[in-house]
C-alpha cells in the first residue's frame, strides 16, 4: 500500500482558491469522509478519483451545502473561512458553480429558459426580454465555439450538447458572481462523461480547457483514469472516505494511479465459491439492447453471478431486459422453455420462475404507503385465496412469520413499508421474492443504503436460497459486496462483457482493475 | 464511532418466536377511524335537540337515506378509479346520460323498461371504455380525458333530450326504487348499501382488489411485480362508468323523469364524499363504507340546516367547508404527514 502522502496544503503560497481541511462526514456509524484535506489552486483542473463509495460524491455534496460535515471540518474559500454547513446560495454568489451528473436541466423547456431560470445577476425579475436573453446566450456559446440554438428545447439536443448547456450555464454563474473573491471562480463537474461517446468527451474537454483559460479553476469528479490523465493537472485519490494521495497527473503513470485507487487490503472473509457443474439453470443468447452487439450468459443452479462495470457501462440494464421491464432482444432458455426476450413481460418472467428486486426500493420494488403484509404477500396472493376470498388473517400470519425469519425490525407487519429503515425494507422485499422459491433471483444494487449488520443478514439469506438451488444474478457496483457473495463475476464496458472472474481470482482489487482496464480496452477497440 | 452488534445477525426462529402479540388498542388510530361517525352522531344529536319532533322522526331519516342513495352510488363509482390512481370527472355526465336514455327510450320510444335499463348501463360501460382508450393508449392524464369526455357527453344529453325534461318513466322502475320500502326506507338505499358491501369485499378480499390498490399506489412497482397495469386501469374506468350509469338508473326511478342538467351538480358532492370517506374506517384509503358515512354526514348537516330555515346556499357552504375542515382535522391527527393516495 503506498504511504499516505497527505499533501501539505500550500495555503501560504496564495495560489489556493479553495481549501478543504479535515472534512469528516458520518452516515450512521460509518464515515463517508474521514478527515479529508485538500486544496485547489487557481487556474488548474483538479481531478477527484476513486471507486464507487470512496467518498467523491459526498465530498462534492459537502461543498455544495447538501451535507453538514462534523465539527472540526473547515472550508476556506478565497481566504475566508466559511460557516458550515455551506449555504448553497452564498457559495454560488462567491463563485462556486456545480454541474451535477444529471445536469439539472428541464428537458421540456428551451435552452434560453434553462439558462435564465437559476441565473445570477438578473436586473429585474418582472420582465424578461427573451430576444435579448437569447442573443446573450448565443454570444456566450459563440465564445466557446458552440453553435446551439437558444430556442431549441433541451430534450431535442444530443446528450453532449445538453452537457455543454449545463456547463456553460454554470460558467455564466461564475462570471456573474461577486468579483471581489478572485472573480474567476471554481467550476465543479460531477461525473459529466459516463453517458458520452469518446469523441464527445474530447469536445467536452476542449470546452473545459477554454474555460480554464479564462482563469477559472475546475474540479472534475470521474471514474475514468484516462480522462484524468488527459484533462487534469493534479488528481486526489480517495479510498473508503480517506484521501490516499494527491498525484501530479503529468508525471504519474497509469498503473500507479490504478494501484493507488484500488490499494492493497487483506480481507479475512472468504466464501467457498461454487463452480458451475452440469447443465445451466438458465441460458441467455444474443442479449442486446439494440445499440450494442449481443452477448451470451449462462447461470448454473445455485450459482451467484455478479455483473458489474463502471457507471454507464451497460451492466445495470441486463436484469431489466431479462425481466421484460426494458426493451431488449435475444433468447432465454429456462426450465426447458425458450422465450424471445423481445416479447418478455414481468408476468411472463414470473411464471418462468424469474424474480427481480429493483434497486429503487420505494419507487420500483415496494409501496411505502402500504403495510408490510400487503407488500410481502403480493406475489403469493393466490395461495391465500379461499372460497370466502382472501384470508387476511392467514396473510398477516405469514407476514409475521417471514418478518421473524428474516429478522425484520420492528416485526410488526401492520406498519407501512415506508416507515422501516432501508435495510429492513430490503429484508421484507427479499423475503417477498424468496418465499416464491424462484429459479432465478435478480438483484439490482441489493444493499445500497443498507447498514453493515443488515447487509450480512441479507447475504446469509441469499446464501440459504442458493443452497436450495436458486440461482442469483446480482448487478452491482459495490465491489466489496460482489467479492463477498459471488461465485463468478462478469465485468462490462461499453455495453458488453469484457472480463470474467472466477474462484480465487475474485477480489475487490481484481474487480476494480477489470472495470478500469475493461473500459480502456473497450474504448481502444471502439476506435 | 459507535460499534455495530454483529454477534447474532441471524437468530433461529425458535429462540425468538414470532409473537404476533395482541397489541393494546391504539386509541389515537381508533379515534381517527371513527371520528367522522362520531361527528355524524353529534350532528344528529344537535339537530335532534333543536328540533326534537321534526328532525328526529323516522320519516325524516328514511327520506334522507332513500333520496341520497343516488349520491352514494355515484361516490362509489368515483372511488374505483380513485383507488387505481385516476380521476373520473365524467361520472355525473354518465349518470345523467343513463337517466336521459331511460327517459327517451322508455317514454318517447315506448320501449319496455328492462331492456332500456340494460342499454343505459351499457352506455356507462362504453363511456368508461372511451375514457380508458384515451388515457391508456394516448397516455393523457385522466383529469383531461374525463373532463373532455364528460363535457362531450353533456352535449349529447342536451341533443338527445332537445334540452327538455322528459317525465312519465315506467312506474315499475319507480316502485322498485323509491315506493317499495323495507323498514320504512326506500329500496334504493339498500341497493346502495349492497353495492358498497360488494365493493368492500372486492377491494379487501379479492386479488383484483389488491391489484387495483397496488396500481393506484405505485405504477412502476406494480409493473415490476407482474401486474398488467393498463388492463387494471381500463377495467377500473369501465367499472366506474357502469356504476355511475347504475346511479343514473336509480335517479330515473327516484324522480320518474329526466332533465338534462340536475344530475350534473352531483359531481362535486360525490368527490367531496369520496375524499371525506378516505379519512374514516380505513384512514388513508378510499373505502366504500367510509364513503357511505361521508355522504350521510354531509346530507344530515344540510337537511338539518335547511329545516332550521337556512337558505339554499348553505348546501355548498356545508359541502365545501365540511370537506376541508374534516380532512384538515384528520391531517392534524397524523401530524401533517403529506397525504399519499396515489
Image (cartoon, rainbow, N blue to C red):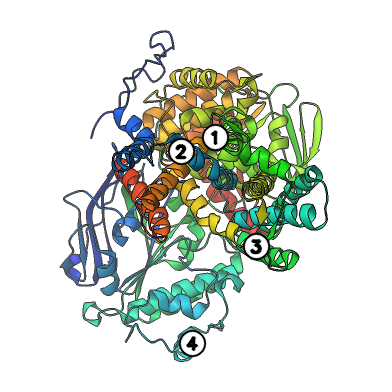
Whole-angstrom CA distance, mark 3 to mark 4, is: 53 Å
Position above or below: B183 against B100 = above
Residue B73: give x, y in percent of width and height. Answer: 58, 43
Question: Which chain does tag 3 point to?
Answer: B
Q: Residue furthest top?
A: B14
The residue wearing badge 4 is: A134
Whole-angstrom CA distance, mark 1 to mark 4, is: 71 Å
Can residue A498 be seen in this snapshot? no
The residue wearing badge 1 is: B185
First-in-chain label (1 vs 2):
2
Question: Which chain does tag 2 point to?
Answer: B
Position above or below: B309 against B199 = below
Whole-angstrom CA distance, mark 1 to mark 3, is: 27 Å
Looking at the image, residue B301 sits to the left or right of residue A206; the answer is: left
Label 3's element?
Answer: loop
- Determine contact: label 1, label 3, CB under 8 Å: no
The residue wearing badge 3 is: B260
Using the rendered image, report if marks 3 and 4 lie on a common chain. Answer: no
The residue wearing badge 2 is: B61
Would you call the spot at circle 4 few (<14 residues within 10 Å), some (14-19), or many (20 or more)? some
Can residue B312 be seen in this snapshot? yes
Looking at the image, residue A286 sits to the left or right of residue A270; the answer is: right
First-in-chain label (2 vs 3):
2
Amino acid at each position: 500500500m503506498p504511504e499516505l502522502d497527505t499533501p501539505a496544503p500550500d495555503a501560504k503560497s496564495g495560489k489556493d482558491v479553495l481549501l478543504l481541511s479535515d472534512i469528516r462526514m458520518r452516515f450512521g456509524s460509518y464515515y463517508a469522509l474521514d478527515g479529508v484535506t485538500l486544496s485547489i489552486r487557481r487556474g488548474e483542473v483538479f481531478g477527484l478519483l476513486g471507486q464507487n463509495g470512496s467518498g467523491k460524491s459526498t465530498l462534492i455534496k459537502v461543498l455544495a451545502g447538501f451535507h453538514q460535515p462534523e465539527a472540526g471540518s473547515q472550508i476556506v474559500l478565497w481566504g475566508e473561512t466559511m460557516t458550515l454547513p455551506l449555504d448553497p446560495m452564498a457559495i454560488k454568489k462567491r463563485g462556486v458553480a456545480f454541474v451535477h451528473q444529471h445536469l439539472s436541466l428541464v428537458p421540456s423547456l428551451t435552452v434560453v429558459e434553462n439558462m435564465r431560470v437559476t441565473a445570477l445577476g438578473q436586473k429585474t425579475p418582472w420582465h424578461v426580454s427573451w430576444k435579448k436573453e437569447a442573443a446573450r446566450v448565443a454570444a456566450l456559446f459563440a465564445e466557446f465555439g458552440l453553435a446551439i440554438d437558444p430556442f431549441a428545447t433541451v430534450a431535442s439536443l444530443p446528450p453532449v450538447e445538453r452537457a455543454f448547456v449545463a456547463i456553460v450555464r454554470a460558467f455564466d454563474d461564475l462570471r456573474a458572481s461577486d468579483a471581489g473573491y478572485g472573480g474567476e471562480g471554481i467550476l465543479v463537474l460531477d461525473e459529466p462523461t459516463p453517458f458520452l461517446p469518446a469523441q464527445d468527451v474530447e469536445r467536452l474537454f476542449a470546452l473545459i480547457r477554454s474555460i480554464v483559460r479564462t482563469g477559472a479553476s475546475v474540479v472534475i469528479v470521474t471514474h475514468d483514469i484516462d480522462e484524468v490523465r488527459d484533462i487534469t493537472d493534479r488528481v486526489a485519490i480517495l479510498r473508503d472516505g480517506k484521501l490516499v494521495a494527491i498525484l501530479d497527473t503529468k508525471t504519474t503513470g497509469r498503473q500507479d494511479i490504478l494501484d493507488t485507487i484500488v490499494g492493497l487490503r487483506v480481507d479475512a472473509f472468504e466464501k467457498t465459491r461454487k463452480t458451475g457443474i452440469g447443465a445451466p439453470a438458465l441460458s441467455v443468447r444474443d442479449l442486446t439492447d439494440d445499440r450494442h452487439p449481443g452477448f451470451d450468459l449462462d447461470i448454473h443452479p445455485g450459482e451467484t453471478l455478479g455483473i458489474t462495470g463502471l457507471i454507464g457501462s451497460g451492466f445495470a440494464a441486463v436484469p431489466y431486459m431479462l425481466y421484460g421491464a426494458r426493451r431488449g432482444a435475444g433468447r432465454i432458455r429456462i426450465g426447458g422453455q425458450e422465450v424471445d426476450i423481445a416479447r418478455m413481460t414481468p408476468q411472463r418472467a414470473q411464471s418462468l420462475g424469474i424474480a427481480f428486486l429493483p434497486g429503487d426500493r420505494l419507487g420500483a420494488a415496494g409501496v411505502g404507503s402500504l403495510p408490510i403484509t400487503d407488500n410481502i404477500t403480493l406475489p403469493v396472493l393466490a395461495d391465500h385465496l379461499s372460497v370466502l376470498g382472501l384470508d387476511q388473517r392467514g396473510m398477516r400470519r405469514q407476514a409475521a412469520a417471514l418478518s421473524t425469519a428474516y429478522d425484520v425490525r420492528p416485526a410488526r407487519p401492520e406498519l407501512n413499508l415506508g416507515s422501516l429503515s432501508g435495510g429492513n425494507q430490503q429484508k421484507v422485499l427479499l423475503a417477498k421474492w424468496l418465499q416464491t422459491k424462484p429459479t432465478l433471483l435478480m438483484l439490482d444494487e441489493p444493499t445500497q443504503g443498507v447498514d453493515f449488520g443488515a447487509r450480512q443478514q441479507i447475504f446469509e439469506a441469499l446464501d440459504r436460497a442458493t443452497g436450495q438451488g436458486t440461482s442469483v444474478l446480482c448487478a452491482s457496483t459495490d465491489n466489496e459486496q460482489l467479492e463477498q457473495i459471488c461465485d463468478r463475476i462478469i465485468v462490462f464496458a461499453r455495453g458488453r462483457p469484457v472480463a470474467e472472474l472466477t474462484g480465487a481470482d475474485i477480489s475487490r482489487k481484481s474487480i476494480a482493475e477489470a472495470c478500469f482496464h475493461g473500459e480502456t480496452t473497450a474504448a481502444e477497440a471502439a476506435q | 464511532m459507535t460499534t455495530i452488534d454483529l454477534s447474532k445477525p441471524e437468530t433461529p426462529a425458535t429462540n425468538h418466536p414470532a409473537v404476533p402479540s395482541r397489541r393494546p388498542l391504539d386509541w389515537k388510530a381508533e379515534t381517527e377511524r371513527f371520528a367522522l361517525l362520531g361527528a355524524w352522531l353529534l350532528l344528529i344529536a344537535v339537530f335532534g335537540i333543536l328540533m326534537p319532533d321534526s328532525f328526529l322522526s323516522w320519516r325524516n331519516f328514511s327520506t334522507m337515506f332513500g333520496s341520497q342513495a343516488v349520491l352514494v352510488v355515484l361516490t362509489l363509482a368515483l372511488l374505483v378509479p380513485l383507488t387505481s390512481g385516476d380521476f373520473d370527472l365524467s361520472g355525473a355526465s354518465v349518470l345523467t346520460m343513463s337517466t336521459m336514455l331511460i327517459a327517451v327510450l322508455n317514454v318517447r320510444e315506448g320501449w319496455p323498461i328492462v331492456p332500456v335499463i340494460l342499454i343505459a348501463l351499457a352506455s356507462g360501460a362504453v363511456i368508461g371504455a372511451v375514457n380508458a382508450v384515451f388515457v391508456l393508449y394516448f397516455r393523457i392524464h385522466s383529469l383531461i380525458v374525463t373532463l373532455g369526455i364528460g363535457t362531450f357527453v353533456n352535449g349529447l344529453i342536451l341533443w338527445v333530450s332537445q334540452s327538455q325534461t322528459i317525465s312519465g318513466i315506467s312506474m315499475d322502475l319507480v316502485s322498485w326504487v323509491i315506493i317499495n320500502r323495507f323498514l320504512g326506507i326506500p329500496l334504493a338505499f339498500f341497493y346502495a348499501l349492497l353495492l358498497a358491501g360488494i365493493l368492500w369485499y372486492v377491494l379487501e378480499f379479492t386479488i383484483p382488489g389488491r391489484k387495483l390498490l397496488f396500481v393506484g399506489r405505485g405504477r412502476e412497482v406494480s409493473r415490476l411485480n407482474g401486474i398488467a397495469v393498463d388492463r387494471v386501469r381500463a377495467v377500473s374506468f369501465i367499472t366506474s362508468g357502469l356504476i355511475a350509469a347504475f346511479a343514473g338508473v336509480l335517479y330515473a326511478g327516484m324522480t320518474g323523469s329526466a332533465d338534462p342538467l340536475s344530475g350534473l351538480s352531483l359531481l362535486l358532492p360525490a368527490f367531496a364524499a369520496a375524499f371525506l370517506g378516505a379519512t374514516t374506517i380505513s384512514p388513508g384509503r378510499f373505502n366504500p363504507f367510509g364513503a357511505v358515512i361521508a355522504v350521510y354526514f354531509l346530507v344530515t348537516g344540510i337537511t338539518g340546516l335547511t329545516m332550521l330555515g337556512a337558505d339554499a346556499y348553505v348546501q355548498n357552504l356545508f359541502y365545501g367547508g365540511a370537506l376541508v375542515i374534516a380532512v384538515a382535522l384528520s391531517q392534524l391527527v397524523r401530524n401533517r404527514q403529506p397525504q399519499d393516495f396515489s
